[in-house]
Amino acid sequence: MNTPAAARKLAILHTEASRGWGGQEIRILTEAAGMIARGHRVLLACPGDARIFREATRFQVPAVELPLGRKRLGAVFDLRRWLARQEFDVINSHSSTDTWLVALARLMLRRAPPLVRTRHISAAVPR
């Protein structure tokens, strides 16, 4: 019997390239903690020197250090190799840099999870 999608527990990867600390990063950790409280498996991927990486512990959100801080071709391949060994139902990216890296890495995966891009600013997207 299939479990309804609304009742199924998901494996969710959040990605964040920002090294700063503010509303965006706090929202990511708060949302991730809320998903964990609802029984989902959540992991945050971010640069190891980012403040969100250090703060994740305080929010009880597991985090992994990945080279997401800069748009580099090597980072795309590193991320692809790492994602190929993981099993996520969805990836939620939050910054421009990590969105580009994840989007390109997904193109090289046999079974790529859907990518959701969350925008945290109210500026219009240029055409």
Image: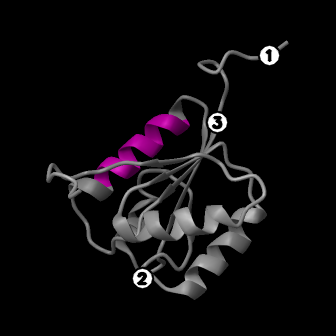
Tags 3 and 2 touching, CB below 8 Å: no
Give amino acid for label 1: Asn
Snapshot quadrant of residue 82: bottom right
Q: Is residue 5 above or below residue 59?
A: above
Mark sitting on residue 70: 2
Most extreme residue toward the left is 123
Tell me where the magenta segment starts and ends, as one range.
26-36
Identify which amino acid the numbered label 2 is placed on: Arg
28 in magenta: yes
The amino acid marked with disc number 3 is Leu
**Outermost residue, right side:** 1
Answer with the quarter of the image where residue 76 lies: bottom right
Q: Nearer the viewer, mark 1 or mark 3?
A: 1
Question: Looking at this view, is 100 or 16 the one in front?
Answer: 100
Which sits earlier in the primary sequence, circle 3 or circle 2?
Answer: 3
The N terminus lies in which quarter of the figure? Answer: top right
Between 90 and 38, the residue placed more toward the observer is 90
Number of residues whose C-alpha sits closer than 10 Å to that of mark 2, classed few (under 14), some (14–19) or many (20 or more): some
Q: Are marks 1 and 3 in contact (CB under 8 Å)?
A: no
Q: Report if the CB atoms under discs 2 and 1 are less than 8 Å apart.
A: no
User: Is 55 above or below relative to 26?
Assistant: below
Residue tagged 3? 10
Residue underneath mark 1? 2
Quadrant the C terminus occupies: bottom left
Q: Secondary structure at mark 1?
A: loop
Q: Residue at x 73, y 62 (%)?
A: 109
Residue at the top extreme of this rendering = 1
Q: In whole angstroms, how far apart are the C-alphas of marks 3 and 2?
A: 28 Å
Q: CA distance from mark 1 to mark 3?
A: 14 Å
